[in-house]
Structure formats: C-alpha cells, structure tokens
Image (cartoon, helix red, strand yellow):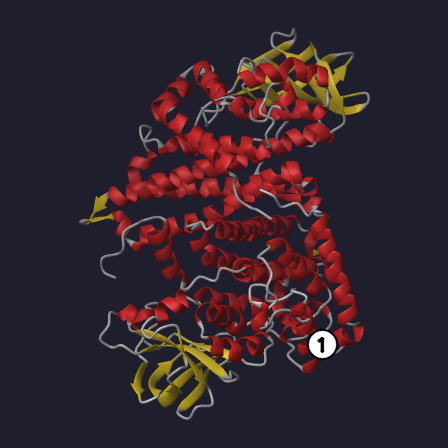
Amino acid sequence: MNLSYSVEYEKFREEVRQFLAENWTEADRAATPDADGVGAMTGSALRTDDRATDFRRKAIARGYMYRHIPKRYGGGEQPADPLKATILADEFRRARAPFEIMGQGPSMLAPTLVEHGTEAQKQQFIEGTLLGRIRWCQGYSEPNAGSDLASLRTRGVLEGDHWVVNGQKIWTSNAHEADWMFALIRTEPDAPKHDGITYMLIDMKTPGITVRPLRQLTGEADFNEVFLENVRVPKDSIVGERGRGWYVSRSTLKNERALIGNATFARRTFDGVQMMAQLTEVRGAPLLEDPVFRDKLVELEGHLLAAEYNGYRLLTAGGRGEDPGLPSIVTKLHTTTLGYHISKLAMDMMSDRGCLAPGEQNAPAAGMFGTAYMWYYGMALGGGAPNIQRNVISERGLGLPRDPRR
Amino acid sequence: MDFGLSEDQLLLKDTIHRWLDAECPTTRVRAVMESDDGHDVGLWKGLAELGVTSLGVPAEHGGAGLDLLDVALAAEALGWNCTPGPFLGNQMAVTALVESGNDAQAKRWLPAVASGDAVLTFALGEGLGEHDVAKLATRADGGKLTGEKPLVPYAQIADAIVVAAHDGDGPGLWLVERGAPGATFTALSGIDMTRRLAMARFDGTPASKLCAGSQAIGRARDAGLTLLAFDCYGGAARCLDMTVQYAKTREQFGHVIGEFQGVKHQLADLATDLAPSQSLCWYTAHAFDHIRDKAERHAAIAKAHMTDIFDRVTRYAIELHGGIGFTWEYDLQLWWRRAVFDRAFLGEARYHRARAADLAGW
C-alpha cells in the first residue's frame, strides 16, 4: 500500500497549476457560460468551441486528459494513476478550465475503438470524439429490450456491400444532436441471442433515420426514440467481428476514468452541497452549523470515501491482473444510490425553496441541485435498472442461484 | 501508487483465519463467553505464538514493528471469527506506550506484550460518553491517581492499565500496575460477552506518568477506532457469508430461498455497502501511519460508517434466517452482540461524525 503524496505528486500539481495559469486565462473564464458560482463546475466542461478545442489539444499533448487513450489516436497516453487523475480533476475544476468531454463518445466508444476498432476506424473517429467534434449517441435499448437487452430485435441484413438496418431504438441520449450512433444490431437471427449481435457505427445523416424526442421526468428531452427504416450502413462499419457485438460492448473499460469516474459525479455533488451549506442561511443560520445536517453530511461522506478508495482498489487490482469481484460489481449501484442521497440532502438544504424548478433564479444555486436530484433517478436506471444490478450482484458476486423463472 | 494488500499481508490474514478456524470454533467462543473473566489464556498464548500480539510492537521492543494496517488485518480476522479476548484494549495501550515516547516503560512492558506474557489495557472514557481529553475528570497528583473510568476492557486481568488523566500540567497518560493499592474493578454485564468490561475506580492509586499532552491519547483512540472498524468489517462479512450459505441451502415453497429475488436483493444491498467499505478501512489504517493529517478524521468517519454497516448486516442476516436467527443456539447472535459493542464502545456514530465535521473546519 503506497498512497503518499510524495514530492513527485506535489511537483506534478505545481506543473499542472502552471500550465493552467499560462493557458486558461481570466478572460477565458469570463467567456464561459455560467462562469460564476456553482454552475462553473459544468459550464467549462460543455465548451467545444475553437478556443476550448485549442486548449484541450495542449492539455492532451501534456498528458493531462484522456490518459487511457494512446497518443497516436489523439489521447494523452499515460500510465493509470488515480492520484494524478485526482490532482488533474481538482486543478482543472479550480481553474474552471475545459476538461474531458462528458458523454458516451469519449467514455464508452473511444476506449472500445482502441480495443476492438480497425486502424481506419481509430484514425477516423477517436480524436474528433475526444475533442467533442464528433458527437455520439448509443443505440442499445429497444422498446422490448430494456433490462433484457440481449433480446434486442433491430435487424441488419447484409446486401452487397451494405447492411440494411430496420428497427427502433429508445432511450437514446442526445440522438437529436449526435453525428453518429454506436449501436447493437441483430445480424444473425438464427444464433443464440447473445451471439447474433453486431456492434455497428451508423452515420446519423443516413436516409431512413428518424429521431423523435422523448420528454423525461425532468421536463427536458435528453432522450429520443430512433427509428431506422432501410438504413444502409457500409459493410465495414462494424466494430469487432460479426456476431460478437455483445462481447465488444461488454468489454471492461480498464481505465482510470471508468473506475474513478464512478464516484466523480457524486463527489462533485457532495462538494457543491458542502459549499452551498456554508453560504445558505436557513431560518437565520448557515445550514452547515446545524448538527443534524452535519451528521448527515459526514454519513454520506463515509459512503463517498468508500466509493473513491474502492476506485483506487479496482485500479490496483486491474494493474495486478486480478478480478476484484464484488468491489467491482457493486460500484454502479453503490455510487448512484449515494448520488441520490447526496442530492436529496441538497434538496432538503433549500428548505421550502426545494420546490423550485431548476433554472429558477430564486432557488439556491439556481436550482442546479434539483437537476442533480432528478438526474440520479435516470442514472440509477441507465445501463441496467437497480434490480438488474441486484441480480448481477447476488448471482455473479455472491454466487446465489438464478431465479428459475428468468 | 498501489492500493491493495501486499503478499505478506494476504499471507498474514490467511494464516490467522486458518488458525482461528481450527483453534477457535464457536464452541470455544461460547465457552469463553460463559467463563468468569472472558479471557482464555491458552487462546491468547496461541495468538501470541502466531505473532498476533507482536504485530504492532516496535522491533526494538521485541515485536514485528509492522503498521497499524497489519494489526488491523488481525482485528478483521478476529471479527470474522468473533474471537473473544483483550485484543482491542491491549493494542490501544501498546499504541499509547509507543506514542508516549517513554522508552523506559516501553522497554519494561512491550517485550512481554509481544510474547503474550503480559496483557495491557487502556482507560479513556468517563461519565456517559465523555471522550474529550480536555474534559476528563480523573486527576493525578504526586504520582497518585484518583477518578473513575466506567468502561475499561479487561481491567481485571490486565497486567497494567494505561490511563488518560490530568495533573497540574494538563492532560497526559499514566500507567497503573496490576494490584496497585486503591484500584478497584467491578465487572459489568455487557451485551457482547466476547469483550469484557469493568468499571475501574482509582483512589490515590500509585501510577507512573508516561507522558504529558493529549497527542498520545488521541493516537491510542484513533488506533482503537480503526481496529473497531476492521472488527466490524470482518464481522459483517462473516454474517453476510453465513446468510448467503443459508440462502443456498434452506428450501421453502420447493426452492432454495436464495433463488427468490426478495432474498437476493436484500443480500445484494448489504454487499453493495459492505464491499466498498473495506477500502475505507484500508485507507484509514494506512493513513494512521502514513498520511498523518488525514488519520484522525478518517478514524472517526470509518468507526461511524462501519458500525452502521455491521448493525445493518446483522439485522438483515437475522431477518433472512427467520426464527432460527433469533435463537441462542444459532451462532448469528454472537456477531449481533459484537456489533452492539463495536457501535457503542469509544462513542456512538453521531459523536464521531460531529468530530469529523469539526475536524473538517465546517
């Protein structure tokens, strides 16, 4: 066990600070939407304009971003190191500078292409994806393939040098703004259900694609239904072998972002709550002085620290080539449940103003905690509903038998 | 960067687990529970031969000179096994002696502790839940100690008690030897019978001053909190394991109950909190020796966090077993008792969370 912030790390932090001071100025900060207050945490992450892209290129060249992606494909290419990753996240947040683009393209597609893509696919897609220039949506779920994803029915039939794709996807985040979709398509109808699926890259401008927004609980429409009707996809647009798409999509992301990242959003929400509790007076006193609130906040911090150190553990286990088992399997349910509890505390923190909608200026932090609170419902469902997670935890993690009715 | 146990640490854990499996089954645990003093000298000597009592003793005093993490891995194994005995108070006293910087007393006691020939214990709390060093009422005057410590682990069998008290110069630590005049101990009836407690009264009892200041007291407390957290992890992991095994074999409605999602999901929820908590424990123990500025706050958070988890796991373990889980003869109740001790001793979760909030400067 060795975690000390040795001289090496302090030096690294200094280098990062210096880089930020030289490359992301006060003027840049002022030009970022939501530059003031708590909104600054997300404002800069969303910027993909030329100035932000130029900055990201420099940061990537220094190895400060996308550390798990090789340099030749536009990544930072550094050995996994959660301490350095933590320092980078801290310092970029403090400087309110653009950091890694959030979204399924950089977090899911890019590492998948690194592992399974052809050289041409890597060259064509990875760098643009990392810079936010190529935006992706994920075409996995279907109306009748949710928790039982592998029963998906959208079909692809090879005709000459094109796949002809027909079917419907649902819960497709950001499909209305995406340039491309990475999708799971059934290409081998006679194979067992997991073995008949192919991982395909589909240009959203292809004729036959219709995107219809799906308004969710938050009132916004971040998801869509995507209808595919005789969509012609070039034959070489598949990732990995034909019929192996299920396994390509499941390939573990052995990178620090995927591991640490699980607690990152919960940490951001927690730090925001702590900061707001200092500034927010409820019935005449700062909330952070309230003993019940303090108790609850530290209780949640216990879970948060456990999640963060568990991330360190998974990374070490990965480096040693060990399968950590339960500590890995429980991560998603643990962090999304935690995020819900942290954001619920934030809602309570606003007392009667907790009933105000996100964006309402009379709500503390313009209601951004309301957004987090709503979002954790969605995050708990994304990638497998909590009860599916519990099945996986109890069967794969604890060795309990499958329910014979499933 | 490396956040995992070393080969030596894995071997240490495995060795203690295997030894306890063989030497201290629950029949022996129950026999010790039902004994007068709750201390099995043979068991303690066996642990000493295995090296458990020397782990945290510095090498210059005949110990292995390892970190608190290594000691804590032993605590986890004892928790898994529900092993009775004076381990906790003994290690707190060892930490206090080491941190006191009192070389003469360390030389006198620590080699005997390492070999298992002497057992020490530690006396901190007073009144109802008072652990704040500044508020302790026990006084030392001219080498004589007067005061009352209501919850001292194994005070009656200990060869010496390290006591937190005050004199004219402020707080400090004193050492009271077995048989010192004016010291009386009253055995208390505890819910957990694997860790015995006594009320200790000192009335002009001769005591040697180990050190002045509150630093060593705080370190001993933090070591104790950390060891309790690991005891919780070991105990909770065992209860979860017992319940999973039970769910795989118990049949109702023509199926093993482990097939039912109602059962599986409760067990999954327990595992979801328990598995990541082990990393919090590791970090806390590692911080004790290597990240000093985070040690105190982490010990407070980990104690509160782990006692919550142990409480919850024992509750659901009993619930999932059904009626048999509520019987005296079924072993689950041993860990349930242990969870009650871990939760209360050295202060409840709320107290430590309040400290953690203060320590953060909130």
> Which amino acid does the dot numbered 1 rest on?
Thr
Query: Residue at coordinates 65% horizontally, 69% vertically from top-left?
Result: A60
Quarter of the image for residue A194 reads: bottom left
Residue A244 lies, with reference to residue B57, above or below; the image says below
Q: Is residue B175 visible?
A: no
Query: Residue at coordinates 70% horizontally, 74% vertically from top-left?
Result: A55
Check the image and name the residue furthest to the right.
Answer: B169
What is the number of callouts on the image?
1
Query: Residue at coordinates 30% horizontally, 41% vertically from top-left?
Result: B245
Check the image and name the residue furthest to the left.
Answer: B254
Q: Residues within 10 Å of mark 1 (few under 14, many from 20)?
A: many
The N terminus of chain A lies in which quarter of the figure? top right
Quarter of the image for residue A210 reads: bottom left
The C terminus of chain A lies in which quarter of the figure? bottom left
Circle 1 sits on which residue? A32
Q: Is residue A202 visible?
A: yes
Using the image as rendered, state which of residue A378 and residue A16 is in the foreground. Answer: A16
Residue A134 lies, with reference to residue B9, above or below; the image says below
Find numbered disc 1 in the image and state the secondary structure of the residue it sits on. Answer: loop
Output the chain of dot 1: A
Q: Position of residue B229 (x, y in %)?
A: 53, 37
